[in-house]
Image (spheres, rainbow, N blue to C red):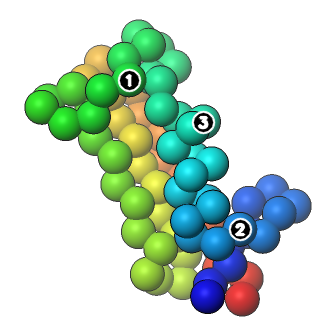
Amino acid sequence: MSLFKYGKQKLSSLELFTKLSKKYNTCEVCGNQHIGNGEGTLDFDSSSVRAYYKRTCKCGWEEELYFEKVE
Ligand SMILES: [Zn+2]
């Protein structure tokens, strides 16, 4: 199982995804929590040497993050 660096922690892809989903569930600009149907998008890919997370909202807000694989 791969672990990814998140601050000082090492998290599995599932733990990382869970943490990010909680943190970025709500748009920081307009408060929208919806994904899909033109409201917002969520991408997560941990199959590469870096995990990739991207959350966008229809208002233009977006967070794009990368996490290095450590093991
Ligand atoms: Zn928004």
Q: With 43 as the anchor, is 68 left or right in this view?
A: right
Question: Can residue 6 be spotted in the picture?
Answer: yes
Residue under circle 1?
33
Instruction: Provide the secondary structure element on which disc 3 rests.
Output: helix
27 lies above or below 29: below
> Alpha carbon of mark 3 to alpha carbon of mark 2: how far?
15 Å
In the figure, residue 62 lies in which quadrant?
top left
**Which amino acid type is marked by label 3?**
Lys
Q: Which mark is residue 23?
A: 3
Q: Nearer the viewer, residue 34 or 40?
A: 34
Mark 3, other Cα within 10 Å: few <14 / some 14–19 / many ≥20: few
Of callouts 3 and 1, the N-terminal one? 3
**Which amino acid type is marked by label 1?**
Gln
| Residue 53: image location, x then y, percent | 46, 55
Residue under circle 2?
11
**Which amino acid type is marked by label 2?**
Leu
68 lies above or below 41: below
26 lies above or below 63: above
Q: Which residue corresponds to the image point at 64% horizontal and 72% vertical from the top-left? A: 12
Of callouts 3 and 2, the N-terminal one? 2
Quadrant location of the N terminus in the rendered image: bottom right
